[in-house]
Image (cartoon, rainbow, N blue to C red):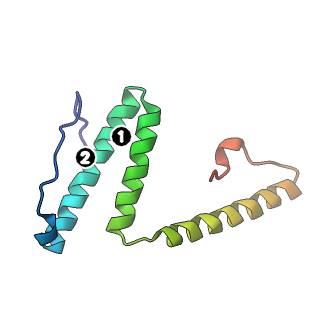
Amino acid sequence: MKRRTGPPPIYLASSGTEKMPAAHSQERLLSLLATLEECRAFLMDKGSSEAARLLSLAILELRMELHHVTDSELKALCDLMIKDDRSGQDAWADQGQRLPPYLKLVK
């Protein structure tokens, strides 16, 4: 994917999306997702990591909507990953080793 220079273009959502066919609506969401990811990359390049993290949350919400993932399903996945992470740390601890801090899962 070729990176653009300068700020990414801003696209405004049109009104009347409730009459839009589902396939076209999903197409628009995918396009919006690509634009948000470009914006996030731009922010990271410019050193605005806090704003980029906030945009990452919006990207996550949009991806969840596109893939029909509920909040409870995401929570269950996170809980499972934390459980697996803890059991993995226990295995490393039994061997006298600890996981580096950057490999720990953070809520």
Q: Position of residue 14 (x, y in %)?
A: 12, 55
Q: Residue at x 81, y 61 (%)?
A: 91
Vertical comparison of 49 with 63: above or below: above
Q: Where is residue 6 in the image (x, y as percent from the top left)?
A: 22, 27
Label 2: which secondary element: helix
In which quadrant of the rendered view does residue 94 lie?
Answer: bottom right
Q: How crowded is mark 1: few (under 14 residues within 10 Å), some or many (20 or more)?
A: many
The residue nearer to you, when weighing 45 against 92, is 45
Q: Mark 2 points at which residue?
A: 35
Q: Where is residue 48 in the image (x, y as percent from the top left)?
A: 42, 29
Q: Mark 1 points at which residue?
A: 40
Q: In this view, does 96 lie to the left or right of 55?
A: right
**For marks 1 and 2 on the same chain, the one whose residue lies earlier in the sequence:** 2
Mark linked to residue 90:
none
Q: In this view, does 39 lie to the left or right of 54?
A: left
Q: Is residue 84 left or right of residue 25?
A: right
In which quadrant of the rendered view does residue 26 lie?
Answer: bottom left
Q: Residue at x 85, y 54 (%)?
A: 93
Vertical comparison of 50 with 34: above or below: above
* Amino acid on which disc 1 is placed: Arg
Q: Residues within 10 Å of mark 2 (few under 14, many from 20)?
A: some
Q: Position of residue 60 (x, y in %)?
A: 41, 56
